[in-house]
Image: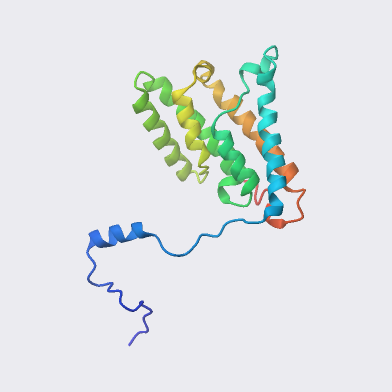
């Protein structure tokens, strides 16, 4: 006789596949752990402020050659959150950030060039394909899905850049965000904030 640890009142043998399927949607009563150290907030603010501001500087000076090529992309905000508020998670490591963003930008620009006349189709293909490529290459970075979408939906300056969009603002911008993460996160004595866990 085997020792089974089945909770009392739960019948695992008579549940229909449909019941099992919908049962998965209930979730559980367990609370997910969250980082709640308020002492980390000022450092997070400093890093996020510096990272985003440094990328925005060229756009403030139209006469600079880089002013039309380095600008803020919406997905940088989500990347900043991971780098500065959750620097130990896998999605925030340099491999995931760099490769995930570059892959998604490449897929997004390609989808727009091939199917730009049908934006809905191009957008769906860009996001779906970039997610799958990130999974296969083990470079999942959730904000990068938005980068693929931005490459398709624009605005016009993004479309004008074409494949240059991958190099700048995407690659150049995320390198700035990572450099700030390395310099600022490691100022903390708290090992939970040290960055990166691994470079590649």
Is 66 situated above or below 34?
Answer: above
Where residue 133 appears, as percent x and y from the top left, is 45, 39
Is 115 situated above or below 178?
Answer: above
Residue 64 visible, this angle: yes
Residue at 41% of width from left, 26% of height from top? 111
Q: Residue furthest top?
A: 63
Residue at 64% of width from left, 49% of height from top? 87
Q: Quadrant of residue 44?
A: top right
Where residue 16 appears, as percent x and y from the top left, is 22, 64
Quarter of the image where the N terminus is located: bottom left
Q: What colour-coding does the image apply?
A: rainbow
Residue 194 visible, this angle: no
Is 161 situated above or below 130?
Answer: above
113 left or right of 98 in image = left
13 left or right of 24 in image = left
Where residue 191 appears, as percent x and y from the top left, is 71, 57
Q: Quadrant of residue 117?
A: top left
Q: Residue furthest bottom?
A: 1
Q: Residue furthest front?
A: 38
Residue at 44% of width from left, 65% of height from top? 29
124 left or right of 170 in image = left
147 left or right of 63 in image = left
Residue at 61% of width from left, 39% of height from top? 80
Where residue 119 appears, as percent x and y from the top left, is 37, 23
């Amino acid at each position: 006789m085997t020792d089974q640890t089945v909770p009392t009142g739960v019948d695992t043998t008579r549940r229909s596949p449909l019941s099992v399927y919908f049962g998965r949607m209930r979730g559980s009563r367990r609370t997910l752990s969250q980082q709640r150290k308020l002492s980390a907030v000022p450092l997070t603010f400093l890093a996020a402020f510096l990272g985003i501001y440094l990328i925005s500087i060229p756009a403030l000076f139209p006469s600079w050659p880089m002013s039309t090529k380095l600008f803020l992309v919406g997905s940088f905000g989500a990347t900043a959150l991971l780098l500065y508020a959750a620097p130990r998670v896998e999605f925030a490591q340099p491999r995931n950030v760099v490769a995930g963003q570059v892959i998604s930008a490449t897929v997004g620009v390609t989808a727009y060039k091939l199917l730009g006349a049908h934006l809905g189709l191009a957008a769906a293909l860009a996001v779906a394909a970039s997610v799958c490529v990130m999974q296969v290459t083990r470079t999942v970075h959730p904000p990068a899905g938005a980068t693929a979408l931005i490459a398709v939906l624009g605005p016009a300056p993004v479309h004008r850049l074409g494949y240059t969009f991958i190099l700048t603002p995407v690659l150049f911008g995320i390198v700035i965000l990572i450099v700030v993460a390395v310099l600022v996160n490691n100022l903390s004595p708290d090992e939970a904030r040290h960055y990166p866990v691994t470079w590649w």
